[in-house]
Amino acid sequence: MTITIVGLGPGDPGLLTIRARDALMSGGPVWLRTERHPGISALAGVTVAGTFDHLYETLDSFDAIYAAIIERLLAEGHDAEIVYAVPGDPLIGEATVRRLLERFRAGNEPSINVIHGISFLEPVCAAVGLDPLEDGAQLVDALDPRLDPTRPAIVAQIYNRRVAVSLKLALLDLYPPEHAVSVVRNAGLPNERVESLPLAEIDRRDGLFDHLACLFVPALAPEGNLRTFDGLRAISHRLRSAEGCPWDREQTHASLKPFLLEETYEVLQALDEGDPDRLREELGDLLLQMTLHTEIADEAGEFGYGDVFEHINRKLIRRHPHVFADAEINSSEEQWKAWQQIKREEKGGEESILAGVPRSMPALAYAQAVQERAARTGFDWPALDQVLDKLTEELGELRAATTHEERVDEFGDVLFVIANVARWLKLDAEEALRRTNAKFARRFAGIESLARQRGLTLDTLSLDEMERLYQETKAAE
């Protein structure tokens, strides 16, 4: 048999299509997804077999509601011709229709006929003066508000204040609280109403939203899109444009290298200090450096943003086959070995396992990184005590060195073994040294402060006196 799905239009009975009216008046049983629709009252003589409003009050999830509606409709339509009437157009914002069509395409279900209707979009667009095609509008579900803030959006299915609260929190992650939005109620009906208010206030009044209300969110200007990467990209592009900043236009990959390094170290410092506010700021500065390098490359025709994103995304997917494919990996050690094998395959042949460690890394960090990779192949001391014995041996050779070149070599050996000790102790040698540097700077500043408080200068103090001030500073921490 056949289930005929009819779109009731946005609400005004005058907007009901002739085909829809004929189907409703055919005399067969009509099932309404909801009777909370202004057009229902004008359909005198329609045989209403039932509605599904009660399910929204008795079931605890939309999935359960949709499943119950579909099963009832399939049961009713198995041996009879029935009509299923939904608000607006059946293919816009109607999850039950979509699921019915999926069941039909899978086979073994009654045939389905769809009679389209005017959706809520047309009167809403008219109410806010929006041409959805010309203005690049997007239609968004309030329960899953994924959108581009640089394009105007119509947000539907804001059934109540609870949904409005969740929607507001999601939108505030993209828009400023004062962003002016419009609530459109009863679009296309005589009592149509459009109310503008700041985004932050959409959940502060009862009764503002119901099944006949939606939200219009105007677009942000590209450079006003401050909470997404696209906003940073637009700002960086303008800085490099002919109308932008002379300094930014002059920069090259080479001239920006010191800033990239500086910003990286500032991120590390924020991490060392455990300061989330500072970390947020420094990560932004580092992201700007990456953006500027991409802008420069794009201008030169070398590569663009899409190439950067595609490269890293493909790499992540390719090197995690246990996540994105059917490989089985049960430990981080197995993952490391698989990662290295995939890298070798990507390079088209064998290369040193140390080749991927950047030689521009700080020397201490580089030493620890290459020893970590070598150890994974089995090239390692059997126990920490032997590493410490090696450190003692290298210190002896440093003491015995007599020339500058010998001292440079032996001192390097000492540092290299110290990096290995850190690896054995599962410490980050670079981080440990940064912490000690910070501790020394803090305590030395304390010596200077105590000396000033006592009317002294460091150049007049003996070493013993400075040591006493150092101990006072240390004790005060």
Image (cartoon, rainbow, N blue to C red):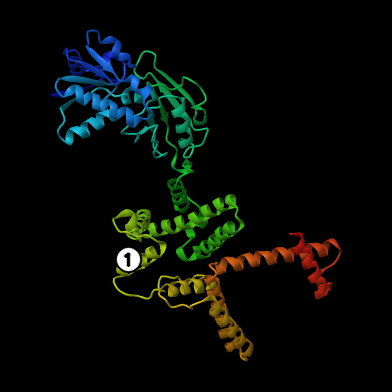
For the point 39% across and 40% down, which residue is it? Answer: 148
- Image coords of residue 318 (percent x, y): 32, 59
- Image coords of residue 473 (percent x, y): 77, 63
Check disc 1 and report the residue beneath it. Answer: 342
Q: Quadrant of residue 47?
A: top left
- Horizontally, residue 421 falls left or right of residue 113, namely right
For the point 17% across and 27% down, which residue is it? Answer: 112
- Image coords of residue 53 (percent x, y): 33, 19
Q: Residue furthest top?
A: 44
Q: Quadrant of residue 356?
A: bottom left
- Horizontally, residue 291 falls left or right of residue 273, namely left
**Along the viewing direction, whichever of 346 and 224 lies nearer the viewer:** 346
Q: What amino acid type is highlighted by mark number 1?
A: Ile
Give the position of the C terminus as an image quadrant: bottom right
**Along the viewing direction, whichever of 16 and 353 lies nearer the viewer:** 353
- Horizontally, residue 41 falls left or right of residue 259, namely left
- Image coords of residue 293 (percent x, y): 44, 59
Residue 115 visible here: no
Residue 76 visible here: yes
For the point 38% across and 76% down, which residue is it? Answer: 352
Q: Is residue 244 above or below residue 179?
A: below
Label 1 Cα neighbours within 10 Å, binned few <14 / some 14-19 / many ≥20: some
Q: Is residue 225 above or below residue 87?
A: below
**Element type at marker 1?**
helix
Give the position of the N terminus as an image quadrant: top left
The tally of labels here is 1
For the point 43% across and 24% down, which residue is it? Answer: 160
